[in-house]
Image (tube, rainbow, N blue to C red):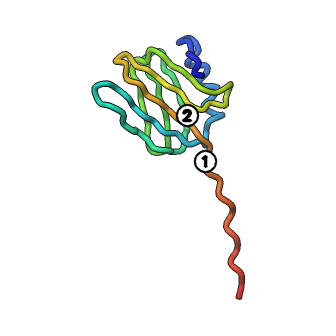
Amino acid sequence: MAKKLEKSQWSGYFDLISKALTGKRAEIEVASLNHGDQIEAEWLPFHGISHDPRNDVVALALEGHDHLIHKPKEIYIEGEGVHLNSLEVIDADDVRQIVLLRDPLMLPAPTAAKAG
């Protein structure tokens, strides 16, 4: 169940979870009535999230991609503490930015080729 974060919590919460989420993979979906649903970024390494209250911007940093959300009005999170599964940011135009997070796929180490 999603939990709404109060605006006074945004900056502190994002500072806390950014370090804990480094290394996860993130997908960003942007959904609006005018443009439909668009995938903005697909499972890129996550580097951080922040809220700049002075400029009223939420910034998501992914490997090779930065995503800015201007004038956010609501933020919902799913997960407990620093174990975040997803978040949704709704901006002033009611555009929904949905960020899904997952651990990277851990493949087994390659085995050494047998000498033959």
Instruction: Tell me the mark number nearer the camera, choosing from 1 and 2.
Output: 1
Q: Residues within 10 Å of mark 2 (few under 14, many from 20)?
A: many
Residue at image x 29%, y 30%? 35
Residue at image x 56%, y 12%? 6
Residue 54 appears in which quarter of the rendering? top left
Residue 44 placement (x, y as % from top left) = 50, 45
Residue 66 appears in which quarter of the rendering? top left
Disc number placed over residue 48 in the picture, else none: 2
Residue 96 placement (x, y as % from top left) = 41, 25
Q: Is residue 46 above or below residue 110?
A: above
Residue 100 placement (x, y as % from top left) = 53, 35
Q: Nearer the viewer, residue 102 or 44?
A: 102
Q: Farthest residue toward the left?
A: 34
Disc number placed over residue 47 in the picture, else none: none
Q: Are marks 1 and 2 in contact (CB under 8 Å)?
A: no
* Spatial separation of the CA atoms under disc 1 and disc 2: 16 Å
Numbered circles on residues, count: 2
Residue 33 appears in which quarter of the rendering? top left
Earlier residue among tags 1 and 2: 2
Disc 1 designates what residue?
104
Residue 78 placement (x, y as % from top left) = 59, 26
The C terminus: image quadrant: bottom right
Q: Nearer the viewer, residue 9 or 94?
A: 94
Amino acid type at image mark 1: Pro
